[in-house]
Image (tube, rainbow, N blue to C red):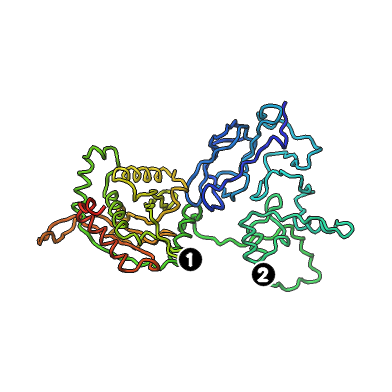
Amino acid sequence: MTTMTEASVREFKMPDVGEGLTEAEILKWYVQPGDTVTDGQVVCEVETAKAAVELPIPYDGVVHELHFPEGTTVDVGTSIIAVAVAGAGGAAPEAPAEQPEAAPAPAKEEPKPEGRQPVLVGYGVATSSTRRRPRKGPEVSVPAQAIQAELNGHGGAVAEKPRPLAKPPVRKLAKDLGVDLAAIIPSGPDGIITREDVHAAATPRTAEPAAPVTAAPPAPATAAAPAPVASYDTARETRIPVKGVRKATAQAMVGSAFTAPHVTEFVTVDVTRTLKLVEELKQDKEMQGLRINPLLLIAKALLVAIKRNPDINASWDEANQEIVVKHYVNLGIAAATPRGLIVPNIKDAHAKTLPQLAEALGELVTTAREGKTSPAAMQGGTVTITNVGVFGVDTGTPILNPGESAILAVGAIKLQPWVHKGTVKPRQVTTLALSFDHRLVDGELGSKVLADVAAILEQPKRLITWA
């Protein structure tokens, strides 16, 4: 029977599925140990800070081990799955049937008697000639091993100090709190330093009165006591971890709000004629099968206004102290999804005809609702539309999408009394709000853009004369 050798196992690492991402959460595994996989087969779905993405395996073989369960957040570059692939002499083994022989390859791991041992972020199956010294028992901590390694040096040489076992978030926490990981006695499984260990090491202990001489000495502690966890009434409160898309959105909004000086202007407009045009377009043969709604014409009106006022379509380059005017429009559409708010954009929206814009808008909305928006679809936006009217509110003061100069909020369209041709009549009315970055968009430019959008929606025939 074919044995599982170190050379026959390949490790698939968490890739950077988006520009500059550092971690992703494993949402769902589609395979289990023992399953056969082929090159290009999707093995899991992960959620990054931008979107949910399916990951294909890049080779054929048999799943040997899943290193992390569903719901785990894993750093980019960390191995998440081991696959037994075909060696030089034949096909991939069906499953690990025997323990590897105990001798030669120094890179070989110790046999695993039951189940898998925890694979930490930054620690995977060894691929070099370096091997970790076998542990003699759970009571031997990493710091103790490190000290012993230094004492074992000969002729003035000092043995390499093993790195304390801790996940990257724990290492960052220790760095922020000024705690030396090497001085911590780990309490986690397999000698892992936990967040509680770091907090315990960082919290100064209150001095206690000396015990009487006759008192029995306390037993030596084998692990640091975990830091106290704040309790709360689960019947009255629910705590939701902030991660993935929601975490990235929160960070981006805080950064935008406190970086770009926001100004918001408002205009209330009669959109009765726009709604009539929507109904006419639904009957147009060229528009059959496309998503036709007021948002489509609002998007087109904004594109026309940008064409007439191109300086609104810009960004602020802080590093070079420059205003970057874009000669293209990647139109962002804010979409509320079960994973949080995302803003995919329609690439080169300025160059699309109305049917092409309707098709792109329909695809964007459908993909977002299915949770399949790719990271690339959310990069490179220049201006954004957010339709808060779908929730029945009149308008809002939207926060700029980072890197953009303007965002248009569209309120609910309601039948209201309106003076039309000198007479008060019931008309379809909405309120628009335009927020812009006051570093590069002054009040005049912002007002012109908002007024142009309002004028087009009040008299949509202007789409023909101004486009």
Q: Amino acid at mark 1?
A: Glu
Q: How far from the left and from the top, in percent, is residue 37? A: 58, 32
The crowding category of the residue bearing disc 2, from other C-alpha atoms within 10 Å (few below 14, some 14 to 19, many at least 20), is few
Which residue corresponds to the image point at 29% horizontal and 40% vertical from the top-left? 290
Taking depth in this image into account, of 131 and 451 the one nearest to the observer is 451
User: Residue 318, labelled with which disc?
Assistant: 1
The answer to whether 323 appears left or right of 68 in the picture is left
Which residue corresponds to the image point at 18% horizontal and 52% vertical from the top-left? 273
Mark 2 or 1, nearer chain start: 2
Taking depth in this image into account, of 308 and 12 the one nearest to the observer is 308
Taking depth in this image into account, of 92 and 30 the one nearest to the observer is 92
The crowding category of the residue bearing disc 1, from other C-alpha atoms within 10 Å (few below 14, some 14 to 19, many at least 20), is few
Q: Amino acid at mark 2?
A: Pro
Label 2: which secondary element: loop
Q: Quadrant of the N terminus?
A: top right
The answer to whether 271 appears left or right of 63 in the picture is left
Closest to the camera, between mark 2 and mark 1, is: 1
Q: Are marks 2 and 1 in contact (CB under 8 Å)?
A: no
Q: How far from the left and from the top, in percent, is residue 413? A: 24, 54
Residue 113 lies, with reference to residue 299, above or below; the image says: above
Residue under pointer 2: 204
Whether residue 148 is visible here, answered yes or no, is no
* Distance in Å between CA atoms under marks 2 and 1: 42 Å
Q: How many numbered marks appear?
A: 2
User: Residue 197, labelled with which disc?
Assistant: none
The answer to whether 149 appears left or right of 40 in the picture is right
Residue 408 lies, with reference to residue 79, above or below; the image says: below
Label 1: which secondary element: loop
The answer to whether 433 appears left or right of 212 in the picture is left
Whether residue 297 is visible here, answered yes or no, is yes
Q: How far from the left and from the top, in percent, is residue 66? A: 62, 40
